[in-house]
Amino acid sequence: MSTGHRPALTEVAPGVFAYLQPDGSWFINNTGLILGEDQVLSIDTCATEARTRAYLAAIRTVTPQPVTTLVNTHHHGDHTNGNRLLGAQVIVAQTRCRDLLARHDGPPPPGLFTPVDWGDITRALPTVCFDRRLDLHDGTRRIELLHFGTPAHTTNDVVAWLPAERILFAGDLAFNGGTPFALSGSISGWLDVLAALGDLAPDIVIPGHGAPGGPELLRDTADYLAFVQDAALPAHRAGLPPLQAAAATDLGRYAELSDAERIVGNLHRAYAELRGQPPGCPLDDSECFADMITFNDGQPLRCLA
């Protein structure tokens, strides 16, 4: 773990915490913690053993009780690698999350990212799965786990919505300060889901990466995805491959976001949709990441996890 970026547990409502990990770039995600009458619930885990153990230490500063329930917002390793270390009795996820985790284990292949000490990230699969909605109750608090029936950031995105507090744990459906990444999902589907999340009218949005905010985070994420669609259409018509299209794209204000090389993966996904391929269909990850590395001057992608 980089010593220059210290995570912090922040209370956003009584008994509701966001664990924020700067700088929110590759594999540096946020998690959530909800202290109830009968359970301690975590929303996601962290990418490495060290980061997950630091999260557990932060939890112990606000409760002596162990985590009893864990919700995975999707299958990516920054949100699930710490599942076993967290030690929850129950792990909840969308059905496709479990399916994908069962097929993929371990860290990314060497050479894709700058070196990371992953530690012990032995896999633990979700034990309770659902399709579209699951409500968790603890005393007077209701936590709605919602999947919107379409690929978005991935094929299995789940949000945790606290309707009484109007707090939305958005997982990676919302980014703040980092480039959204649609390689595993669908740009058009993600836009539809963001519209549905906006209809919830949250007061506080905890993104999967970056600082908390309000509903503007949903709009900002949608604006970036629309930008990708606008860049993809003429480039696809001109026959430019995604890497060449990315090099020719003026990122404008989005150049300030971290992990700008994700424009390449996003264009691969946008091209698939323009070809009429099903939302969320598997793409060649090795080709897409090779193109992102080429875009990144041939260097492994920066990862501070």
Image (cartoon, grey):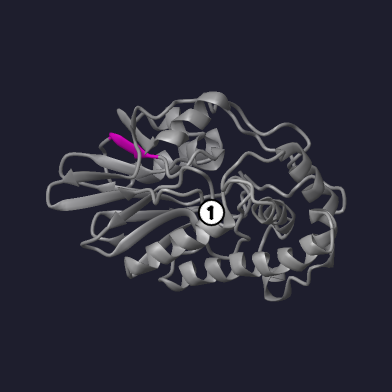
Q: Give the range drawn in magenta.
A: 66-71
Residue 107 visible in the snapshot? yes
- Residue 85: image quadrant is top left
Position of 206 relative to 269 (above/below):
below
| Residue 200 drawn at (x, y percent) | 32, 65
In-front residue for pair 97/187: 187
How packed is label 1: few (under 14 Cα within 10 Å), some, or many (20 or more)?
Answer: few
| Residue 1 drawn at (x, y percent) | 61, 43
- Residue 136: image quadrant is top left
User: What residue is shown at x 72% (from left), y 65% (from top)?
Assistant: 233
Screen quadrant of the C terminus = top right
Residue 9 visible in the snapshot? no
> Mark 1 highlights which residue?
6
Asked which secondary structure carries label 1, the reply is loop
Position of 84 relative to 265 (above/below):
above
User: What residue is shown at x 34% (from left), y 45% (from top)?
Assistant: 132
| Residue 203 drawn at (x, y percent) | 33, 70
In-front residue for pair 264/120: 264
- Residue 44: image quadrant is top left
Magenta run includes residue 288: no
Residue type (three-letter) at the residue carrying disc 1: Arg
